[in-house]
Image: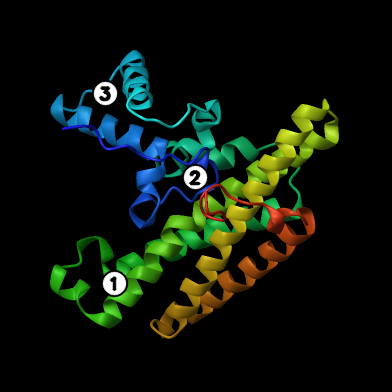
Amino acid sequence: MKNEKKEYISGIYNYCDRWCEKCRFTANCRLFSTESKIDTYRIMNNGKLPEAEDIFDMEFNDIENNENEFDEEDFWDDEEDFDVEEDENEEKILKGLEGKKECPVEKLSVEYLNKAHSFVKALDEKFNFTEASAQRKDDPRFKKLLDAFDVINWYHMFIMVKIKRAIDGKSEIQIGMDEEDNEFQSYDMNGSAKIAAIAINRSQDALNDLLSLTEEFNFEIEELMVLLGKILNEVDREFPDYKKFTRPGFDTDH
């Protein structure tokens, strides 16, 4: 049978939230395709990861089987974007910030990360989401609670990572580089700020849902909502052009 052609959207994964199971664009994402092939290889080879040249072959064969023209931007990525959940952890991030002067939005995002992390742990201990039975997950109230928990849990570190990336990009622009580098840094800065703002808005909505579901945590929830409001205000101030940024696929008809 002839291989099905895929329409990959160039660079779509660079400014997404890496929540693939919730994404409608997985069929258009080259990174998702590659990671899926890596996972399949690992399953078929008793947990062994493929060698670098095998991963390249996966990509090369995929390109050959597609009519779409190869675009090197499809492969642009870095360690922060490749897998936030697996490659970034709280200890590593906070250690990297030691000795560096932080701007207000960075300080606020670190404060949110720490408080949200404690909140997520307390909420899970109370409702035992990780061990929830299928029957409990079918209950509408519990499902709404679990959905809100998942959002807070997914984004509480992601927000700080993307804000830090945007701030680092802004710092490099201020140092002064050539025009091409400045253009790239400005593009990436605004893209990172935009996905951070999207994560903040989704987290605010989830916290608002939790207010009506968990009265005993209202103080913690309200504290987190205030923090997110402050962070978003600072993002608007630091990156005034981020709202104009067009994310490949998500904000376009591609």
Judging depth in this view, the residue of 229 and 219 nearest the camera is 229
Q: Are marks 1 and 2 in contact (CB under 8 Å)?
A: no
Circle 3 sits on which residue? Answer: 49
For image coordinates 48% across by 41% down, the residue present is 9
Decide which of tag 2 and tag 3 comes sooner along the chain.
3
Three-letter amino acid code at disc 2? Answer: Glu
Q: Is residue 100 visible?
A: no
Position of the N terminus, as image quadrant, is top left
Residue 179 versus residue 207 in the image, above or below: above
Tell me which amino acid carries mark 3. Answer: Leu
Disc number lying in front (2 or 3): 3
Q: Is residue 167 left or right of residue 144?
A: right
Q: Is residue 113 left or right of residue 26?
A: right
Q: Where is mark 2, residue-wise?
A: 90
Q: Position of residue 250 (x, y in %)?
A: 52, 54
Check disc 2 and report its element: helix, strand or loop: helix
